[in-house]
Image (cartoon, rainbow, N blue to C red):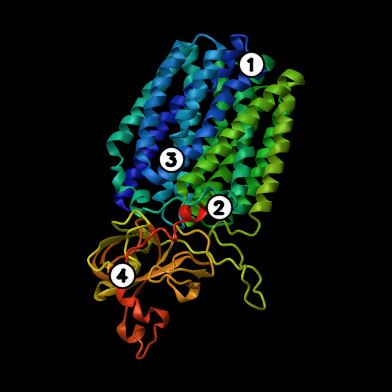
């Protein structure tokens, strides 16, 4: 991690620490406050569930938007909104108002957590995902552990409104740090890449992401049960003070935060899947143990065990998520999905426990939480069974005895091509018709070392993906003809494998950016490969050009029309 990325990491760390500490001051006090106002278990569940519900709906949008437009605007807007919401808490007078405020707070939260985690993932060096995410998670866990302790003390010595005011002050501090010290959006890695986000349909079918999602869901459901109803259990069954309740909520988070760094370091060196599985077993036992609580000491050590389980599993889980997001170029989307799992887990856990409290007995909610936790751990293992979570690799399929037409051959863009052409119609059909057109190629920074010695070549072969091409036909009417020709005897863009090739002049190489001349492709085209053009290798002696013999000279002035545009084909 270079000096600039370390500055970004430090800014994100302290900004989120301040904001999360402020939230942690308030959240554990809400159940007791609502219970004192006469709220039933269902209403307490809704206070937490409203937050999770609204955040769940907005997370995919904000995660996707951060992949397209950058991270900083969403982060600073969300942190400032948290401060405004703290004022709304102070002015609220009833349970219904608390539910509404928490619903709005959920929307605000969707702007912050997944985007910040995606930003950290962007700047994480490969092979250090566990260490970096473990270090960053300390900001969350320490903030969440210090918050409840401070909240209990503030409430006991001052008032609940004082706790809300502290939340607002800390949120403003996080906002100021991010606004002043995060670099401009144009300098962010995700913006420099310029790659279009991966389709949601492809992300949602990834078995590894499904497994990560499932584990995060059930683990957070257990957190929802503990955060929402451990304070009620401690208050009603054992008459524990607000300060002591703060300690109970804090200690599990604190223990988990303390071991984040060593567990992250270990996650980069041992099997991450085993760490998640072990953490799941410990968490299951801890949640079940709350059903047999006898007093403060029992609740304290059971909370410690819960924190240990999460501290072992979460650095490995988040390291695997960062690696997966990097491999598929969808960091913001992957982090948004995991935060969706977090929100759904809080909703499911809190509402499920509320129903159990009203219909049966509160302690049975912890038994049900343990059952859900073990099922989610098993599902995680099933979905990631064939994936190496330390490298992201999956075992190759058994090699067929003969070539198969349904064999998938995955490719990932190495960069993006920027040109003046934004419309599929009216642009050159070959480099010969674009001799004066200047374009820029921006490579993913990880491929910059591969550009060494390239400036010694005058021309390059660009291999790219026709990303706007959908479907194909085996006979087409090419741009240079009015007669249907066999697809493979043309250079039509709609092909079984929509791959394009252009030879361009190289003008300049600057870090991970290339300036080229004679580019004939659409703006934002994903680049698959670059090769130097060498006449002795690529020019043949005697050639035939088939039906193009009498038409090749027209390529200089021929422009594309709408014959291969998908919208026209549908009409």
Disc 3 vs disc 2: which is toward the camera? 2
Q: Where residue 570 sits: x, y (%)? A: 52, 53
Residue projecting furthest to the bottom: 542
Q: CA distance from mark 3 to mark 1?
A: 36 Å
**212 relative to 88 in the view: left or right:** right
Which residue lies under the disc numbered 1?
Answer: 235
Q: Mark 2: give few (<14), some (14-19) or many (20+) Cα within 10 Å.
A: few
Which residue lies under the disc numbered 3?
Answer: 115
Earlier sequence position, callout 1 versus callout 4 = 1
Question: CB under 8 Å between callouts 1 and 2?
Answer: no
Disc 1 vs disc 2: which is toward the camera? 2
> Against 364, is 271 above or below?
below
Q: Where residue 436 sits: x, y (%)? A: 22, 66
- Camera-side residue of 447 and 469: 469
Which residue lies under the disc numbered 2?
Answer: 202
Disc 3 vs disc 4: which is toward the camera? 4
The residue depicted at 59 percent of the width and 47 percent of the height is 212
Q: CA distance from mark 4 to mark 2?
A: 33 Å
Q: Where residue 416 sits: x, y (%)? A: 36, 59
Circle on res. 208: none
Residue projecting furthest to the front: 482
Q: Mark 3: give few (<14), some (14-19) or many (20+) Cα within 10 Å.
A: many
Circle on res. 431: 4
Earlier sequence position, callout 3 versus callout 2 = 3
Q: CA distance from mark 3 to mark 4?
A: 40 Å
Task: Give the image quarter of residue 408.
Answer: bottom right
Question: CB under 8 Å between callouts 4 and 2?
Answer: no
């Amino acid at each position: 991690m270079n000096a600039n990325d370390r500055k970004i990491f430090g800014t994100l760390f302290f900004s989120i620490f301040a904001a999360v500490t402020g939230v942690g001051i308030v959240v554990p006090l809400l159940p007791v406050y609502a219970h004192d106002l006469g709220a039933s278990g269902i209403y307490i569940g809704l206070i937490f569930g409203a937050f999770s519900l609204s955040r769940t709906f907005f997370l995919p949008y904000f995660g996707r938007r951060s992949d397209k437009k950058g991270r900083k605007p969403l982060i600073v807007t969300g942190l400032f909104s948290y401060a405004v919401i703290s004022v709304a808490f102070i002015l609220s007078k009833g349970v219904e108002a608390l539910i509404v405020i928490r619903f709005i707070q959920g929307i605000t939260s969707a702007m912050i957590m997944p985007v910040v985690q995606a930003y950290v993932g962007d700047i994480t060096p490969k092979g250090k995902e566990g260490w970096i995410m473990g270090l960053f998670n300390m900001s969350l866990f320490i903030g969440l552990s210090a918050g409840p302790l401070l909240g209990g003390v503030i409430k006991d010595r001052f008032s609940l409104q004082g706790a809300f005011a502290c939340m607002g002050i800390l949120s403003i501090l996080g906002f100021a740090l991010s606004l002043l010290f995060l670099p401009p959006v144009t300098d962010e890695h995700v913006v420099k890449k310029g790659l279009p986000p991966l389709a949601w349909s492809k992300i949602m079918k990834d078995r590894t992401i499904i497994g990560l999602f499932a584990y995060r869901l059930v683990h957070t459901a257990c957190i929802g049960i503990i955060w929402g109803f451990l304070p009620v259990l401690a208050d009603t069954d054992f008459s524990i003070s607000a300060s002591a309740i703060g300690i109970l909520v804090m200690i599990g988070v604190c223990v988990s935060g303390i071991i984040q760094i060593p567990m992250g370091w270990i996650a980069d060196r041992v099997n991450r899947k085993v760490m998640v599985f072990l953490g799941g077993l410990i968490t299951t036992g801890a949640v079940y143990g709350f059903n047999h609580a006898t007093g403060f000491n029992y609740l304290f050590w059971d909370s410690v065990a819960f924190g240990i389980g999460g501290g072992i599993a979460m650095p490995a889980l988040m390291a695997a998520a960062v690696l997966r997001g990097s491999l598929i170029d969808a960091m913001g989307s992957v982090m948004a999905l995991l935060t969706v799992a977090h929100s759904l887990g809080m909703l499911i856990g809190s509402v499920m426990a509320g129903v159990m409290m009203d219909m049966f007995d509160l302690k049975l909610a912890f038994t049900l939480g343990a059952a859900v936790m073990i099922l989610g751990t098993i599902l995680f293992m099933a979905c990631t069974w064939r994936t190496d979570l330390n490298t992201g690799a999956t075992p190759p399929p058994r090699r067929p005895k003969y070539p198969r037409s349904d064999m998938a051959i995955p490719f990932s863009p190495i960069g993006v091509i920027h040109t003046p052409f934004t419309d599929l119609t009216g642009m050159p059909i070959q480099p010969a018709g674009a001799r004066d057109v200047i374009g820029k190629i921006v490579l993913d920074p990880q491929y910059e070392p591969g550009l060494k010695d390239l400036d010694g070549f005058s021309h390059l072969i660009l291999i790219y993906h026709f990303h706007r091409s959908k479907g194909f036909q085996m006979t087409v009417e090419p741009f240079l003809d009015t007669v249907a020709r066999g697809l493979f005897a043309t250079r039509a863009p709609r092909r079984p494998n929509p791959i394009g090739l252009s030879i361009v002049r190289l003008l300049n190489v600057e870090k991970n950016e290339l300036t080229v001349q004679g580019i004939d492709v659409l703006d934002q085209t994903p680049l698959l490969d670059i090769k130097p053009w060498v006449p002795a290798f690529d020019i043949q002696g005697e050639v035939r050009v088939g039906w193009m013999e009498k038409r090749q000279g027209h390529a200089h002035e021929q422009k594309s029309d709408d014959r291969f545009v998908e919208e026209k084909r549908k009409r």
